[in-house]
Image (cartoon, rainbow, N blue to C red):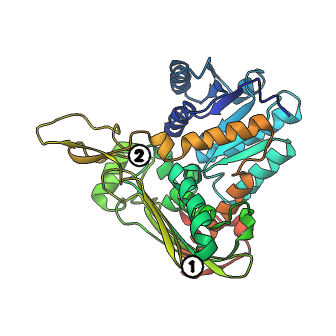
Amino acid sequence: MPNASVNPLRIGIIGSGFIAHFHLQGFLGVRHVEIRGVYSPTPANRDALALAADKAGLGPCRAYATVEDMLVSGEVDAIWILSPNDTRLEHMRAIHAAVRDGKTALLGVACEKPLARNVAEAREMLRLVEDAGLNHGYLENQVFAPAVQRGKEIVWRRAVPSGGRPYLARATEEHSGPHKPWFWQGETQGGGVLLDMMCHSVEVARYLLTEPGAPRESLRPVSANATIAHLKWTRPEYAERLRQTMGDDVDYIRRPAEDFARGTVLLEDERGDTVVIETTTSWAYVGAGLRVQIELLGAEYAMEFSSLNTGLKVFLSRNVGGGEGEDLVEKQNAEQGLMPVIDDEAALYGYTHEDRHMVQAFRNGERPMETFHDGVAVMELLMALYRSAETGNTVRLPAENLETYIPVPARPA
């Protein structure tokens, strides 16, 4: 077990995109941590992230030309896998090989959501990290959002003793579309909006419905039902706009992925009572910006949270000009009018608390609250939802052949 009272956790980051910069913001609120390395296949991007880490006082951070170079450097104690979905298993294999061959002395690995593109890849991620003897954390930020943590604590402490356990959790995440081309490519990403965003919604709902202190497996999945649709980005004018913005490899006339998904999961608690997860996700929502809505309902109470119901708002008249950006809220869609402002997105969305929790768990040799086991469980539910949407039938759980199931947009052309 590491001497947590003395040494900071030295982290190496794999990936240098949007989510990596979000985690840098989160690490500013974490003690006993240093960002000591970064790998990305694009030299300019990895250099930029290393420089950002140094400027933030999180370094000294070095950019590495390969993952293997970073692993054998002796400069990192844990790895944060933040690269695109199709690369995560490859990186986990490199980590496993380096540990097996005695070339690195890592304590743990944390992986951004989703854990993989399908159940088979997710199970292999789990097998490799455990075969290497490493601690592991699943980076599902919404579970760690302060509103979620505080809301769950209040409901289960104050309401449940007299009003009974919660029986319905609703989670919605919507925005106008991802930042990078690979998110839009079904084979690379693993699907469309259902995989990209319903991984958030399913897990935060499952977490809220689980009794504090009980294992997540105390809720047994019974069935999954889903609907997916192509609402906006397959329309010719928007498909062309997407091609011009993201490049010719993103063709939503010939190779679309769903931009809307609705899912319902039924589960049973320890007593055999039914609880329900209800989720909606969309890349076709145009509002002020990213909208996350979460509810937890019981017989005598309700909890709700909306990310756009901010305490801070700014009004900008039509006479105030300016370039497009995301300086007020993630996925910002307007620059004028009465605008909600999220003053600390990394904290509100859960990244700060998530990274703090993982750092503390790895330093103390403790099992994190979210592990690769949870990443596998989420992937099983997502694949059941995809199968339901494809067949038009409710999928009973546990279901056969989910191990080999690939969503339609992720299948080879």
Q: Residue at x 75, y 27 (%)?
A: 71
**Secondary structure type for disc 1:** helix
- Place residue 195 in its image quadrant: bottom right
**Secondary structure type for disc 2:** loop
Residue 258: % across, % down = 46, 63
- Place residue 20 in its image quadrant: top right
Q: Earlier in the sequence, mark 1 or mark 2?
A: 2
Crowd tier of the residue under label 1, counting other residues whose Cα lies within 10 Å: few below 14, some 14–19, many 20 or above: few
For the residue pair 386 and 168, the one nearer the viewer reads as: 168
Residue 168: % across, % down = 55, 74
Mark in front: 1 vs 2:
1
Tell me: residue 7, above or below residue 17: above
Type of amino acid at the residue the image marks with label 2: Asp
In the displayed structure, does residue 41 sit left or right of residue 103?
A: left
Q: Which residue is mark 1?
A: 391
Q: Which residue is mark 2?
A: 248
Residue 286: % across, % down = 31, 56
Q: Residue at x 66, y 51 (%)?
A: 115
Tell me: residue 46, above or below residue 292: above
